[in-house]
Image (cartoon, coloured by chain):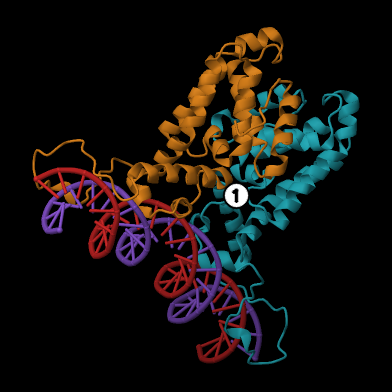
Chain colours: A cyan, B orange, C purple, D red
Amino acid sequence: MTGVLRDPRRGDVPRVPARREGAPNLGPRAAAGNRAALLAAAREVFGSDGTGAPLSAVAKRAGVGQGSLYRHFPERVDLVVAVFEEQVVAVEELAQAPGVGLPELLGLVTRHAVDSVGFVDLVRSGVPDGRLSGLAERVAGALGTRLPDATASGAVPPGTTPDDLLLAVSMVVGGLSGVGAADRTSRATRAWELLGIEVRIPDAPA
Amino acid sequence: MTGVLRDPRRGDVPRVPARREGAPNLGPRAAAGNRAALLAAAREVFGSDGTGAPLSAVAKRAGVGQGSLYRHFPERVDLVVAVFEEQVVAVEELAQAPGVGLPELLGLVTRHAVDSVGFVDLVRSGVPDGRLSGLAERVAGALGTRLPDATASGAVPPGTTPDDLLLAVSMVVGGLSGVGAADRTSRATRAWELLGIEVRIPDAPA
DNA sequence: TAGATACCGGACAACACTGTCCGGTATCTA
DNA sequence: TAGATACCGGACAGTGTTGTCCGGTATCTA
């Protein structure tokens, strides 16, 4: 269950041995289109129900069969990583942009958590897995690069350590549990205030 | 499924119409003993795996059949409420004891959360249900009675509202997610420090 | 001591989700 | 136009959990 998973298909025994290797014969609806539809559907389902949502619901929302879902993403974690990789990359890129400080980074992370229950699961490692932990660590790493500046500018209280920063993120995100969509932004904003940490939460879908 | 649940049993049609009403005929092991065993088992299972743990595991650990479990606690929530009612009562009683302040109350709540994943579920309303929300509200009410004193004594930052207090509890408890038993106390302690709220966490199983 | 009672506990059916398999079909090549 | 290819999507088996049912048994009454 946990291991490798090949795609047997009937072509396992090639009729013509040395045929064109990478000559894809696009199916009727194009594999890429299906993959995109699955990712979009998963983003919505994971966003509202968390990363533990039934995969059958993802396939249904995407309008594809379960076979196609499992062909593109053999395990749940494959789909989760694919969905949230983009948002992690956004955080990393923002961290490297000039003139960006910790308040902007924390704001983006908060935005993602406010918008998606699945992102909350990710940060809280609700689904402990090597690759998911990797995503969380990348976020942590990005935040860490801006901590010294934030300490110097007073955006965080004196004596705040990198571990404290991660704990603070975990606390704010954890404080969103069970909170309806309408109140999430205000709750997160107040949570950061209670911690005395400055954030700048962006408006748009980020 | 969600509604009432009678116990059909074959005695549904009473052989002797107007028999002694409340004359229990104790079974071999006594119903009360089984109930206590189930509660103890549920406390352990919910404590380590949360309130969503399989009820079959509870029955197995209690050494009773599933039939007995569902006879005593027809729905999961019945068992959850019975398990945590005791701890909520402890908080309420502590709140009414003379000379007890908010730090002691928050400490007891934190102790329960540190010791039991299920209590974390309860506070975070991981299982939204009328009766469970009721337990959470009783905790909130108990804390609220001591907030004015705490504000006056500086145990909480100036301007802390009752809502802030609940958010803070939610944050601290949320910060425990995915944290192993060994680090839970230190994490919670540090979380309260970051919030600038004074707590006195008791040592014993409370 | 003999009969009746009520509880005990495991077996069992129902249900939901996961992951695999296979017939069907649109596209590409010749 | 005809054949081959590779992808599509639903059906299906496997697994785990929930909640119900029923035979077995110890205790109480007469």
Q: Tell me if B95 is positioned left or right of A166 in this view.
A: left
- The location of residue A128, given as percent across then percent down, is 67, 53
Whether A61 is drawn above or below B144: the answer is: below
What residue lies at 88% left-to-right and 28% top-to-bottom? A151
- The location of residue B10, given as percent across then percent down, is 18, 52
Q: Residues within 10 Å of mark 1 (few under 14, many from 20)?
A: many
- The location of residue A92, given as percent across then percent down, is 80, 45
The residue closer to the viewer here, A96 or A132, is A132
Q: Tell me if B98 is positioned left or right of A129 in this view.
A: left
The disc numbered 1 marks a residue on which chain?
A: A
Whether B78 is drawn above or below C27: the answer is: above
The residue closer to the viewer here, A37 or B174, is B174
Q: How many marks?
A: 1
Q: Tell me if D15 is positioned left or right of A135 in this view.
A: left
- Amino acid type shown at disc 1: Arg
- Report which quarter residue A81 is drawn in: bottom right
Q: Which residue is mark 1?
A: A43
Whether B115 is drawn above or below D25: the answer is: above
- Report which quarter residue B3 is drawn in: top left
Q: Residue furthest toward the top?
A: B152
What residue lies at 58% left-to-right and 20% top-to-bottom? B163
What residue lies at 89% left-to-right and 37% top-to-bottom? A98
Tag 1 secondary structure = helix
The residue closer to the viewer here, B83 or A83, is B83
Residue A171 in view in this figure = yes
Whether A134 is drawn above or below A32: the answer is: above
Q: Tell me if B181 is positioned left or right of C5 in this view.
A: right
- The location of residue A27, given as percent across then percent down, is 58, 72
